[in-house]
């Protein structure tokens, strides 16, 4: 008599698409370093809480007073944008039609997590502009980061938020009032909120439809 190797039990056919979908989501999260991003966002919340609780200050005018919160918000937006980078290029883009929805969902979840963690950190003391200004600034700079990732590559998603931070510093120092520099506007300003939301929507559309530009990205004509 010959012993036959036992085959592992197979999942029912009805559950196989669900299992494959969950596996795709897990691999996508790991390839985008989402767990590490969540840890960094939590650390930024702690930094903001400490800065507000112990009243860390930089001597100067309005730009200096907002420097620490703006730096924290910029770093959070850069983290969300950089997670759009994937290491597999065209191979990944051709693998599944679900990727645009995954890209959109992960960005929204990370942006919500960033807002929640920074809002918790803001409870440590007085935050200029309050939670409304925090939400507006974070949303707008995340949109800039996503546009940078789509244009320059996910690994360079931080370039847009960091460059915009310098623009904000100059605008606050010189008294600019344009709504496109929303951080210089009051927390309840409608124009600034509309501009920040528009930039965020554009970034979401670009990253969901096109993905982050990377080393493996090639124009179809090539």
Image (cartoon, rainbow, N blue to C red):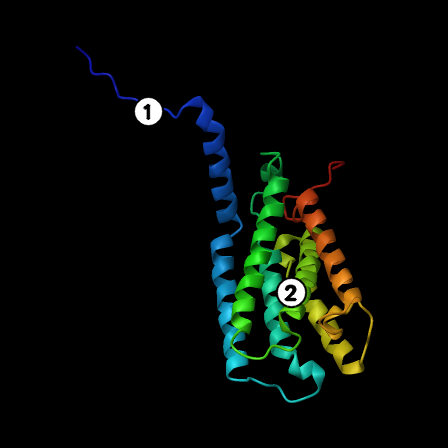
Q: Is residue 214 above or below residue 172?
A: above
Label for residue 93? none
* Position in image of residue 165 (x %, y %): 69, 71
Depth check: give the residue in front, 99 or 196: 196
Look at 68% across and 88% down and name the residue there: 60
Q: Is disc 1 surrounded by few (<14), some (14 to 19) or many (20+) residues within 10 Å?
A: few
Res 118 → quadrant: bottom right
- Quickly name the residue at label 2: 135
Marks 2 and 1, how far apart in space? 49 Å
Residue 116 appearing in the image? yes
* Position in image of residue 40 (x %, y %): 50, 63
* Position in image of residue 18 (x %, y %): 48, 32
Res 97 → quadrant: top right
Query: Circle 1 sits in a helix, a strand or a loop, which is it?
Result: loop
Q: Nearer the viewer, mark 2 or mark 1?
A: 2
Q: Is disc 2 surrounded by few (<14), some (14 to 19) or many (20+) residues within 10 Å?
A: many
Farthest residue, direction bottom:
59
Tell me if 1 is positioned left or right of 30 in this view.
Answer: left
Depth check: give the residue in front, 83 or 76: 76
Q: Is residue 63 above or below residue 15?
A: below
* Position in image of residue 161 (x %, y %): 67, 65
Farthest residue, direction front:
188
Total count of labels: 2
Res 210 → quadrant: top right
Residue 84 appearing in the image? no
Q: Is residue 56 above or below residue 118?
A: below
Look at 26% across and 20% down and name the residue there: 5
Q: Are marks 2 and 1 in contact (CB under 8 Å)?
A: no
Label for residue 9? 1
Query: Circle 2 sits in a helix, a strand or a loop, which is it?
Result: helix
């Amino acid at each position: 008599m010959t012993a036959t190797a036992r085959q592992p039990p197979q999942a029912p056919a009805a559950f196989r698409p669900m299992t494959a979908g969950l596996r795709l989501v897990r691999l996508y999260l790991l390839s985008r370093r989402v767990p590490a991003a969540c840890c960094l966002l939590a650390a930024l919340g702690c930094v903001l809480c400490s800065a507000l609780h112990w009243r860390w200050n930089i001597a100067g005018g309005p730009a200096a007073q907002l420097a620490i919160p703006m730096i924290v918000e910029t770093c959070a937006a850069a983290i969300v944008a950089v997670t759009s980078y994937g290491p597999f290029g065209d191979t990944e883009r051709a693998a599944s039609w679900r990727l645009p929805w995954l890209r959109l969902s992960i960005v929204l979840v990370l942006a919500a997590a960033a807002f929640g963690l920074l809002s918790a950190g803001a409870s440590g003391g007085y935050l200029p502009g309050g939670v409304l200004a925090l939400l507006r600034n974070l949303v707008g700079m995340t949109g800039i980061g996503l546009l940078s990732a789509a244009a320059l590559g996910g690994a360079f998603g931080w370039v847009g938020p960091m460059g915009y931070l310098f623009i904000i510093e100059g605008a606050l120092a010189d008294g600019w009032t344009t709504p496109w520099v929303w951080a210089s506007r009051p927390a309840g300003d409608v124009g600034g909120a509309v501009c920040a939301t528009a930039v965020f929507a554009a970034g979401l559309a670009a990253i969901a439809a096109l993905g982050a530009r990377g080393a493996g990205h090639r124009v179809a004509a090539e």
